[in-house]
Image (cartoon, helix red, strand yellow):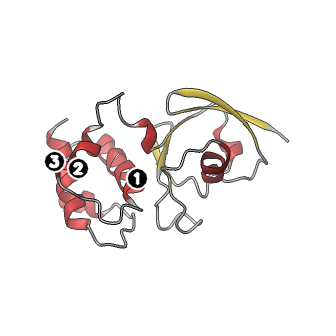
Amino acid sequence: MPSYSFVLNGKPVTVEAPADMPLLWVLRDLLNVTGPKYGCGVGVCRACTSHLDGDEIQPCVVPIADCTGREITTIEGLADGDRLHPVQQAWLDRDVAQCGFCQPGQIMAAVALLKRTPRPSDADIDRIENVCRCGTYCRIREAIKQASRSR
């Protein structure tokens, strides 16, 4: 079985896995990183949204073989010790989560948006395609705007 080395949430890791194993299963099943959620397995719901070299990805459709030597960040890697990332803090301040299932992916998508567009418009925020089954989109928008002001 081939092995793959990469940086996960700031720490070097090596795993043995089939080359075509989706990164999501490597994270969840081999590395016990459960923030990214399995929702659809085809990159549509975006519940698994994480970052690869700082860019937003859906690890359910990224094979582990594409991750060698790269940096992966999940929701578990956003906070700086006990200090939450500004988006995480805004999520709490705005009481965004309802059931919470999609929230790690939503937060990771918001972080990626703010990296690309520090002061996003409503139209920019509307382009986030993550699905929230509970419909907390208004609170998500408020939290993103709050986080953009705190940066």
* Quadrant hosting residue 16: top right
Query: Residue under circle 2?
Result: 92
Query: Residue drawn at (37%, 57%), measured in percent from left and top?
Result: 103
Question: What whole-number distance in Å separates the C-alpha atoms at marks 3 and 1?
Answer: 17 Å
Q: Which circle's residue, 2 or 3, is located before the other in the chain? A: 2
Mark 3: few/some/many CA within 10 Å (<14, 14-19, 20+): some
Query: Residue drawn at (60%, 44%), measured in percent from left and top?
Result: 32
Q: Are marks 2 and 3 in contact (CB under 8 Å)?
A: no
Mark 1, secondary structure of its residue: helix
The answer to whether 36 appears left or right of 20 in the picture is left
Q: Which circle's residue, 1 or 2, is located before the other in the chain? A: 2
Mark 2: few/some/many CA within 10 Å (<14, 14-19, 20+): few
Seen in the picture, residue 83 relative to 22 is either above or below; the reply is above
Q: Residue 111 location, x and y as percent?
A: 33, 45
Q: Residue 41 location, x and y as percent?
A: 59, 65
Q: Is residue 58 visible?
A: yes
Question: What whole-number distance in Å separates the C-alpha atoms at marks 2 and 3?
Answer: 11 Å
* Quadrant hosting residue 31: top right
The answer to whether 107 appears left or right of 26 in the picture is left
Amino acid type of the residue that numbered disc 3 sits on in the rendered structure: Gln
Question: What whole-number distance in Å separates the C-alpha atoms at marks 1 and 2?
Answer: 12 Å
Which dot, 1 or 2, sits closer to the camera? 2
The label number, if any, that marks residue 43 in the structure image: none
Mark 2, secondary structure of its residue: helix
Mark 3, secondary structure of its residue: helix
Amino acid type of the residue that numbered disc 1 sits on in the rendered structure: Pro
Query: Residue under circle 1?
Result: 104
Query: Residue under circle 3?
Result: 146
Q: Which circle's residue, 3 or 1, is located before the other in the chain? A: 1
Mark 1: few/some/many CA within 10 Å (<14, 14-19, 20+): many
